Image (cartoon, rainbow, N blue to C red):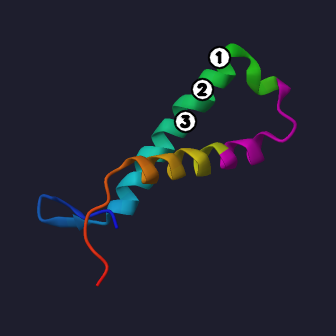
Amino acid sequence: MISDIVIGGVLIPGLLAVACLALVLTVAILRLLSATGASRRLALPPVVELAVLVIVFGLLVQSLPATGSLQ
């Protein structure tokens, strides 16, 4: 489980922070695809955008160290 983050006394769930980071990275990847012209070759752009978001989120969750324990 990813630990929670405290910012100014406000508790932010760890997965929410990871999801926001994944959204920012997805926007950057999609802009890169658009700048190179690769986005014109996609059959269903909304489906590809969702797939990129899910992949980036999954990679971030796997790469971040897990904290906490299951008891």
**Which quadrant would the C terminus be assigned to in this image?**
bottom left
The crowding category of the residue bearing disc 1, from other C-alpha atoms within 10 Å (few below 14, some 14 to 19, many at least 20), is few
The crowding category of the residue bearing disc 2, from other C-alpha atoms within 10 Å (few below 14, some 14 to 19, many at least 20), is few
Outermost bottom residue: 71
Q: Amino acid at mark 3?
A: Val
Q: Amino acid at mark 1?
A: Ala
Horizontal relation, residue 45 to residue 6: left or right: right
Q: Are marks 2 and 3 in contact (CB under 8 Å)?
A: yes
Q: Secondary structure under badge 1?
A: helix
**Residue 11: x, y in percent?**
22, 67
- Figure quadrant of residue 31: top right
Q: CA distance from mark 1 to mark 3?
A: 12 Å
- Residue 52, relative to residue 58: is it above or below? above
Q: Secondary structure under badge 2?
A: helix
Q: Amino acid at mark 2?
A: Arg
- Residue 14, relative to residue 18: is it above or below? below
Residue placed under numbered mark 1 in the picture: 35
The crowding category of the residue bearing disc 3, from other C-alpha atoms within 10 Å (few below 14, some 14 to 19, many at least 20), is some
Q: Which residues are magenta?
A: 41-51
Q: In percent of the image, x 48 and y 46: which residue is there?
A: 22
**Residue 56: x, y in percent?**
54, 44
Instruction: Inspect the magenta stretch and tell me whether residue 45 lies in it.
Output: yes
Residue placed under numbered mark 2 in the picture: 31
**Residue 34: x, y in percent?**
68, 23
Q: In percent of the image, x 67 and y 49: which residue is there?
A: 50
Horizontal relation, residue 38 to residue 7: left or right: right
Residue placed under numbered mark 3 in the picture: 27
Q: In percent of the image, x 39 and y 61: which residue is there?
A: 15
Q: In percent of the image, x 32 and y 62: which residue is there?
A: 2
